[in-house]
Structures are given as structure tokens and as C-alpha cells.
Amino acid sequence: MKRTAKAHWNGTLKDGKGQITTQSTTLNNTQYSFKTRFEEGVGTNPEELIAAAHAGCFTMAVGAVLTQAGFTPGDLNTEAILDLDMQALSIIGIHLELTGSAIEGVTEAKFKEIAEGAKANCIVSKALSVPITLNVTYNS
């Protein structure tokens, strides 16, 4: 299986602009620029897309592991916070904030154990070489 995305850029780093399109066209000529990457602006940026991919992958992995353990996943919400060091121009880590609720029969301890396993084994986590931290909140 292969997944693709395309990017186009025109102009200098600070004044140029580009568009990103994904294979599914969920992103279709979506704007990105210096302003959307390093300041505030309408559009997306590579770091935001990495955080979104990580949040989505990890949350699906938690659901999969819960199912494999015999639980019916309820509500799972994850915020991925990517930490970008502007001096080194380097991603230095990602923090995952997971909140789960409405999962009949699962204890808080088991939910945390499942979340830790999902963090280590989700496809995006395995692709990243930065520290990944996790905070879990379970509302039974």
C-alpha cells in the first residue's frame, strides 16, 4: 500500500506560498506559507500535519488494542502537541493528551496500559525519532 501527497511552492521562503494536496483530496490545494508555518495565518503547515497524523494514528491504535482486549471502545479524544525548536529548526518531541470515556469494563490502569502500548506501536510513532510523551485521562 502506498499513500501520496503533493506539494507545490513558488517564491522565496518568507514571501512565497504553496499548496498541498493529498491522494484522498481531503487536502486539495490547501495553502501553506512561511506565515502559516512560523507565525499565524490561514492554511496548514508540515508540523501541524505531522501532529494530526500522529493524533489520528494513535487514537485508532488505542481503539484497535481495546477491541483486541475484548472491550468496546467508547469516546477516545487525542490532542497531539508537536514541540518545534525554532533555534535548531528541529522537532524535539510530541506530547499526546488522551481522554477516554464510556468503555464498559475497562479499569483506569488497564486503559493506561493499553494507551502506552498504542503509543509505542502506532505506525506514526514508529516512524518518528523524537521523544513521545503521553498523558492519559480516563472518565469511567
Image: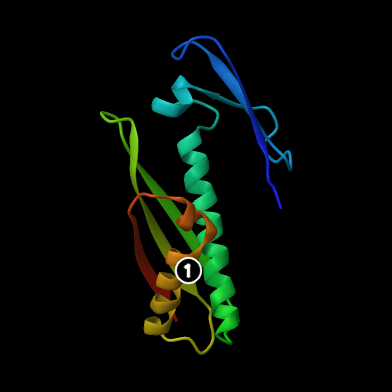
Q: Residue at x 54, y 9 (%)?
A: 11
Q: Residue at x 73, y 38 (%)?
A: 25
User: Is 119 situated above or below 45?
Assistant: below
Decide: few, some or many residues near mark 1? Use Cα within 10 Å; few <14, some 14-19, many ≥20: many
Q: Residue at x 58, y 64 (%)?
A: 60
User: Is 119 situated above or below 14?
Assistant: below
Q: Where residue 62 appears, x then y in whole percent?
A: 52, 70
Q: Quadrant of the C terminus?
A: bottom left
Query: Looking at this rendering, what residue extends furthest in the bottom direction?
Result: 105
Q: Where residue 131 appears, x then y in whole percent?
A: 32, 53
Q: Pick the residue in front: 75 or 3.
A: 3
Residue under pointer 1: 118
Q: Secondary structure at mark 1?
A: helix
| Total number of numbered discs in the rendering | 1
Displayed quadrant of residue 23: top right
Displayed quadrant of residue 107: bottom left
Instruction: Residue 39: tell me if it is visible.
Output: no
